[in-house]
Image (spheres, helix red, strand yellow):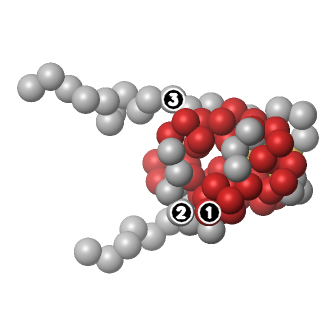
Amino acid sequence: MPPKKTSSKPVAVRLRDGSVVEVAAAETNDIEFAQSLRDAIVNSGLSQYRLSILTGIPQSALSGFLTGRDIRLSTFTKLAQVMGFELQQNPNKAPRNV
């Protein structure tokens, strides 16, 4: 199956420090949350060292995430919180009793 075609448009994300950065995001239904978080980190101007200090996450883990590696949910959550993202459960993806 060919990859789904998405149109990318910038989305403004407000960081905890009050600054606003623009990140590329796909159409609302197709947002790649991890990529949006990566984009926000890169566009924030924060160094990996500074982000490591703010989150308590080792710089090597941050580097891995920014280059596309998977990270633990707890690490992802810390990054999301520092960058001003909010994690929410998608009710359409929630487990259902069969």
The residues bearing labels 1 and 3 have C-alpha atoms spaced at a distance of 24 Å
**Quarter of the rendering occupied by the N terminus:** bottom left
What's under tag 1, amino acid-wise?
A: Gly
Residue indicated by mark 3: 88
In front: mark 3 or mark 2? 2
- Circles 1 and 2: CB atoms closer than 8 Å: yes
> Disc 1 to disc 2, how far (Cα)?
5 Å
Whether 57 is drawn above or below 84: the answer is below
Q: Is residue 8 visible?
A: no
Residue under the image location 87 percent in, 49 percent down: 50
* Residue 54 relative to residue 4: left or right: right
List x then y, in percent, for residue 74: 55, 36
Mark sitting on residue 64 = 1
Determine if residue 51 is in view.
Answer: yes
Q: Residue at x 41, y 32 (%)?
A: 90
**Could you say where residue 80 lies in the image, as x and y percent from the top left?**
66, 39
Q: Quadrant of the C terminus?
A: top left
Dot 2 falls on a residue whose secondary structure is loop
12 and 87: which is toward the camera:
87
State the mark number for residue 84. none
The residues tagged by marks 3 and 2 sit, at their Cα atoms, a distance apart of 22 Å
Circles 3 and 2: CB atoms closer than 8 Å:
no
Q: Which residue carries the number 2 mark?
A: 69
Percent of width and height locating residue 45: 88, 56
Query: Which is in the foreground here, disc 1 or disc 3?
Result: 1
Indicate the amino acid at tag 3. Answer: Gln
**Residue 49, located in which quarter of the rendered image?**
bottom right
Q: Residue at x 15, y 22 (%)?
A: 97
- The tag earlier along the polypeptide, 3 or 2, is 2
**Residue lying at the far bottom of the rendered structure:** 2
Residue 63: percent from left, percent from top: 69, 62
Res 10 → quadrant: bottom right
